[in-house]
Image (cartoon, helix red, strand yellow):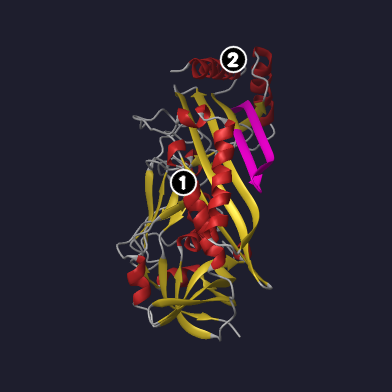
């Protein structure tokens, strides 16, 4: 174990010991040291460069059925002692809760390749060049690419340590890197936007030129877009758009949402909630996954959880607390954004499983439809009821071929009905950060136009 991790474990042990000395029946110390670099280039010149670092300790204690929490960025002995004491003071202000507990050590934790030293070793100049090459590739792709809104390189790393009074002593270091490009193509009075991104765990796998060309292609192909008449037809969702719909159901698949009566999937275990072609998975141990880690924010081993299998609801996501309320095991989804908060139920690598159909075949079987490449207003969808009404843009499908660009239409309905009508799933699973989806084809839906 590296020297810094050993030091953090020693500090976390001291926090737990101090809390126990002051009367805690159970205590947990969570330390996270994180740093993130953002470089934005425009016109070949660096426009912004930001390096942010944050580190600190969060202490959680249980006493007489009450839980208290405190955090500090002061990792000195005095700072650690103060945080432990404050957590105990805070727990006295809360009500008893019989489901509050800390997890015991797991039997096994997967060894994961989630830290590439190449990210740290690469020079700032190399990282700037990645953003420049992405911008250059986009402009070279088509002369109509006129405006680069953002050509960004980003990376980050974190060292996470957890110690609790049940014997858990864990640590891991992880890192990621990525590039993102947003631009506009212009022809006459028409302007259309495009974007692309690529996030990975390995620096040498970044493909900035491909990202540049993809962003340019997405913008250029939409030049001249116009509405079409209202129709009832098939829609094909490209992976990015399908991932947006995936995000609509994510909150509803947590045990917490079900327990609070805020899930459209409540009471439907074992029932069909989507097409038999839909399988939805959360996998915190996914090889190469941006959100992969050997354990979650409270020390539970991460795992692969099949939530919807061939259209049938199989389960929910849990942290230790919500699992105790339902009398089940945590799925390793106690997610923490920083040392300043407690582990809440959240997703890790969350995705629709890939199908077997090539995208070309999904399109070739459609006489009339729309290939949706952009959705507007997804934030207005209701995650509790699943109702949505969104604007869409994309490419018209005529006799199995993509023809002209269209925008100014809308689709709406309920996400369960929408997923029930999926009759084709592509083989092209693609991740956008921690969420991913292949192309999805929905058999028939009303598309409101002119």
Task: Tell me the SS state at disc 1.
Answer: loop
Q: Nearer the viewer, mark 1 or mark 2?
A: 1
Is-magenta flag for residue 426?
no
Where 163 sits versus 427, above or below?
above
Crowd band around label 1 with a 10 angstrom C-alpha radius: few (<14), some (14–19), many (20+): some
3D distance between C-alphas at marks 1 and 2: 53 Å
Callout 1 touching callout 2 (CB < 8 Å): no
Q: Earlier in the sequence, mark 1 or mark 2?
A: 2
Q: Which residue is mark 2?
A: 21
In the image, 427: left or right of 52? left
**Residue 171 visible in the picture:** yes
Please state the horizontal and vertical placement of residue 10, each as a whole percent of the image: 53, 15
Where 354 sits versus 93, above or below?
below
> How many marks do you count on the picture?
2
Q: Nearer the viewer, residue 218 or 393?
A: 218
In the image, 394: left or right of 328? right
Is-magenta flag for residue 41?
yes
Please state the horizontal and vertical placement of residue 40, each as a whole percent of the image: 64, 43
Image-quadrant location for residue 228: bottom right
**Residue 66 visible in the picture:** no
Please state the horizontal and vertical placement of residue 203, each as a whole percent of the image: 47, 36
Q: Residue at x 57, y 16 (%)?
A: 11
Please state the horizontal and vertical placement of residue 63, each as a whole percent of the image: 59, 27
Q: Residue at x 47, y 52 (%)?
A: 210
Task: Give the quarter of the figure containing the C terminus.
Answer: bottom right
Which residues make up the magenta segment?
A: 36-60
Q: Which residue is mark 1?
A: 207
Instruction: Please identify the residue farthest to the top as the structure is shown.
Output: 77
Q: Residue at x 40, y 41 (%)?
A: 288
Task: Tell me the SS state at disc 2.
Answer: helix
């Amino acid at each position: 174990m590296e020297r810094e991790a050993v030091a953090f474990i020693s500090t976390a042990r001291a926090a737990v010991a101090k809390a126990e000395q002051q009367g805690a029946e159970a205590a947990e110390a969570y330390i996270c040291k994180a740093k993130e670099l953002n470089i934005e280039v425009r016109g070949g010149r660096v426009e912004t460069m930001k390096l942010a670092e944050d580190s600190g300790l969060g202490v959680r204690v249980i006493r007489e059925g009450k839980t208290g929490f405190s955090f500090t960025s002061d990792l000195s002995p005095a700072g650690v002692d103060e945080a432990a004491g404050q957590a105990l003071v805070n727990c006295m202000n809360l009500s008893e809760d019989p489901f509050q507990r800390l997890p015991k050590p797991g039997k096994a934790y997967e060894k994961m390749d989630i830290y590439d030293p190449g990210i740290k070793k690469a020079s700032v100049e190399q990282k700037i060049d990645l953003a420049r090459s992405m911008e250059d590739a986009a402009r070279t792709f088509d002369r109509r690419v006129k405006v680069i809104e953002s050509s960004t390189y980003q990376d980050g790393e974190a060292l996470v340590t957890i110690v609790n009074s049940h014997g858990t002593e864990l640590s891991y270091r992880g890192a990621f890197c990525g590039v993102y490009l947003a631009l506009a193509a212009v022809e006459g009075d028409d302007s259309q936007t495009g974007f692309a991104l690529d996030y990975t765990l390995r620096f040498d796998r970044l493909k900035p030129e491909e990202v540049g060309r993809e962003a340019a292609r997405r913008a250029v192909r939409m030049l001249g877009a116009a509405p079409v008449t209202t129709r009832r037809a098939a829609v094909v969702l490209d992976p990015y758009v399908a991932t947006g719909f995936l995000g609509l159901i994510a909150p509803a698949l947590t045990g917490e949402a079900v327990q609070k009566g805020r899930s459209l999937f409540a009471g439907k275990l074992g029932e069909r909630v989507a097409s038999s072609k839909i399988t939805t998975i959360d996998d915190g141990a996914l090889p190469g996954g941006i959100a992969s880690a050997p354990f979650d924010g409270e020390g539970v081993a991460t795992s692969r959880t099949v939530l919807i299998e061939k259209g049938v609801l199989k389960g929910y996501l849990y942290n230790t607390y919500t699992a105790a309320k339902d009398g089940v095991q945590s799925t390793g989804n106690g997610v923490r954004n920083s040392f300043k908060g407690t582990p809440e139920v959240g997703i890790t690598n969350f995705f629709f499983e890939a199908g077997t159909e090539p995208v070309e075949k999904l399109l070739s079987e459609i006489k009339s439809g729309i290939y949706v490449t952009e959705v507007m207003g997804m934030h207005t969808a209701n995650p509790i009821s699943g109702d949505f009404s969104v604007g869409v843009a994309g490419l018209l499908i005529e006799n199995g071929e993509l023809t002209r660009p269209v925008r100014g239409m809308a689709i709406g309905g309920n996400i369960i009905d929408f997923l029930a009508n999926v009759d084709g799933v592509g083989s092209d699973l693609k991740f956008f950060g921690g969420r991913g989806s292949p192309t999805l084809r929905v058999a028939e839906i009303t598309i409101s136009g002119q």
